Amino acid sequence: MSQNGASKSIEIKNIDIYYGPKLAVKDVSLPIYTNKITAFIGPSGCGKSTVLRSINRMNDLIPGARVEGEILYKGENLYASNIDPVEVRRRIGMVFQKPNPFPKSIYDNVAYGPRLLGVTKKSVLDEIVELSLKQAFIWDEVKGDLKKSGLALSGGQQQRLCIARTLAVEPEIILMDEPCSALDPIATQRIEELMRELVHNYTIVIVTHNMQQATRVSDYTAFYSIRKEGTDAQEKRWGVLVEYNQTQKLFEQPEQSETADYISGRFG
Amino acid sequence: MAAQVTYMPDDAGYRKQLAARQNAGYRWQLFFLGATLVGLVVLVVLLLSILNQTFGLIAVRQKIDPATLTNGRAMTELSAVELSDILETNLSKGKLQGAFLTLVTGTDIDRGKLGTEPLGDLLPTLVFAEGLGAKKFTELTPEDLGQIIADNTSQDVLVNYVNREVVGREVLQNWSLIDSLFNRAAIEQLVKDKAEGKGFSNTLTAAQLDEQKAAFASAHLEMHSWLSGEFLNEPNSTVASDAGIRGGLIGTLWVISLTMLFATPLGVGAAIYLEEYAKDGIFARNAFLKRVNAIIETNIRNLAGVPSIIYGLLGLALFARLLLPLTSGAIFGVENGRGNTILSASLTLALLILPVIIINAQEAIRAVPRSIREGSYGMGATKWQTVSRQVLPAAIPGIMTGIILSLSRAVGETAPLVVIGAAVFLSKDPNGPFQPFTTLPIQIFNWTEQPSDQFRAAAAAGIIVLLAMLLVLNASAIILRQRFSRRLQG
């Protein structure tokens, strides 16, 4: 279903995600459109972050985590045996829930990625750092003191620094795992503006707890929920994708009653 | 409806009970304060008792008044030539030859060759005045001996030698600092009594008693610090007042440097592997490997608690005996055939502190926040890039803490070194890994075993040297650690 002529950047096909023997997410399929913002919403424990982290194989870092099914990127399965997760993560960048600048200077934070890829020339690094910080709307605030520790910035600035850092390796897709949950409303607003700006050049997937945020920034929304089986001690819970649609349609005319209940605040 | 049931005490009861609760807290607080004070007091007493033994009065006997030798000048003002002249005029030829052997040749040479080969060939590193190098040892006149001694011996060593051999300076008895300061009159009286033959053990023969009486009669009291430049710079001796810590100091520096050289890379390397590599991939999926891992980790922790003497036995069997060709330096062309070398000691101590370094480094690596790792991986860093550029720099302060702790432990370790076969008397300074060794604690331990009180004073001075050295090592490690962590904060 290619709406507005947008092309698919990622195609998630029937993935099940396990942590050890435990099923965490079952049978999720959805497309991610190029140069659009896709929001994942749903109650706590529904697996939205798990799906997000499986897109750039961050789940590989958790011992025992396993993904079954296919995630296609440019027609290639990211979980094929010949794919190196390091390459995947450089193409599909990630911004985390809690701002996590490295304990280094602002400059070194942004130059970290390019240096990993072997860029050593000072003039080139200078240019990358300036460009990335400008793209992340933080250049004007820090240009005077790039030697300052990234940890000395405010929470909102730290998060924008992390975004700049991600942009520096020129990814095509940026995954954001509740990027505003640790920020105040003003910092949140700045990040949202930044996302609307970045989406002209990047594809963005964002996990959010905040439904208003989903309506404000996203083009598409996927609603996840929890399924249970068994009782009390032996209860098994896993996440499923309930509904996926254009954001406006999902919020105004949800097809599933569960979606309607959630967005109207009746549960979750 | 029944009256509302309350399980909480009423106001009066509550107040009373609150006071009891607070009092229980105060009692514990008092106990904690007491514990701290006891610790402090013990520490202060320990330091004072060491200082008390290090300084104090000594009774010194001199056979000749040094002023008559030096025309009234102080001994320390004389040049090496003047001092060797004193030796020449006051010692017999035999004693002068003895002085030559002690001061100049040392124990390195084959004394059998002294009568057959020219000195210049036998001792190529020495300075010889014209013609003397061609002579054999037995051909030297007293003037020749004095000349060579003056040319090859430092002034302060000569001062000591003249004091001992010519002046006949001998320390008869020593007193603690507190006695010296507050009981001086009693000490003076004691010396006078002894000069009259009172206060000696009745096991002395008449001849011994006479000798002691004469000695105390000519003795004078002087304030003495057992810790001095000479103490640091002199080798061990059978005479307490001449004994120095130099051999132990150099030995400790050698052993500790090599120990750290071996233990740090091995310990940190093992910790990185166990924390970063042995936890995922095949290790996470295979139950057997997981189990092996857990067993290894538990055993490293157990090894940290193994008594050090057991490491000594291991070191003796493994390094000093089994790996003799390595530890004696035979495979490097050094031929002394002994396994109780600096290398054996360092390897043993390295084994001893390895678990401590591994455990601390593991804790430090584990404490690096997940978010930093994720941030790095999320940028497309490989595992090694993440470990080397993020995890290790962040973990270095913690790793350094472990190294500092283990360093202190290794410096003070005595038992395993005794087992390996540490020397007590070294004829020359250790100058390489394949040399026999002694260390500060071993030297101190040996002195405390001697019957003479004077050696106890020397041991106290040795303890101060050991403590000072620990302090310097720890301080430099801490400064290093702080610099690392400051660099991290940007």
Image (cartoon, helix red, strand yellow):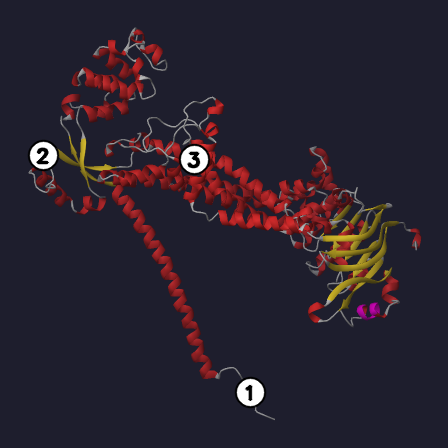
Which label's residue is closer to the chain start, 2 or 1?
A: 1
Rendering coords of residue A145 (x, y %)? 64, 43
Amino acid on which disc 1 is placed: Val
Question: Which residue is located at x 50 percent, y 35 percent?
Answer: B261
Residue B18 in sight: yes
- Look at the image and say whether residue A259 sits in the magenta stretch: yes
> In what quadrant of the picture does the C terminus of chain A appear?
bottom right
Disc 3: which residue: B345
* Residue closest to the eye, A154 or B479: B479
Packing grade of label 2 (10 A; few <14, some 14-19, many >=20) is some
From the viewer's perspective, is B281 left or right of A203?
Answer: left
Cα distance, mark 1 to mark 3?
Answer: 74 Å
Disc 1: which residue: B5
User: Comparing marks 2 and 3, which lies closer to the viewer?
Assistant: 3
Which label's residue is closer to the chain start, 1 or 3?
A: 1
User: Comparing marks 1 and 3, which lies closer to the viewer?
Assistant: 3
Disc 2: which residue: B217
Location of residue B464 by image quarter: top left
> Which chain's residue wears label 3?
B
* Residue closest to the eye, B420 or B6: B420
- Look at the image and say whether residue A43 sits in the magenta stretch: no
Amino acid on which disc 2 is placed: Ala
- Secondary structure mostly taken by the magenta-highlighted segment of the chain: helix
Q: Which residue reaches farthest bottom?
A: B1
Q: Which residue range is magenta in the image?
A: A258-262
Classify mark 2: helix, strand or loop: helix
Location of residue A177 by image quarter: bottom right
Classify mark 1: helix, strand or loop: loop
From the viewer's perspective, is B420 left or right of A266?
Answer: left
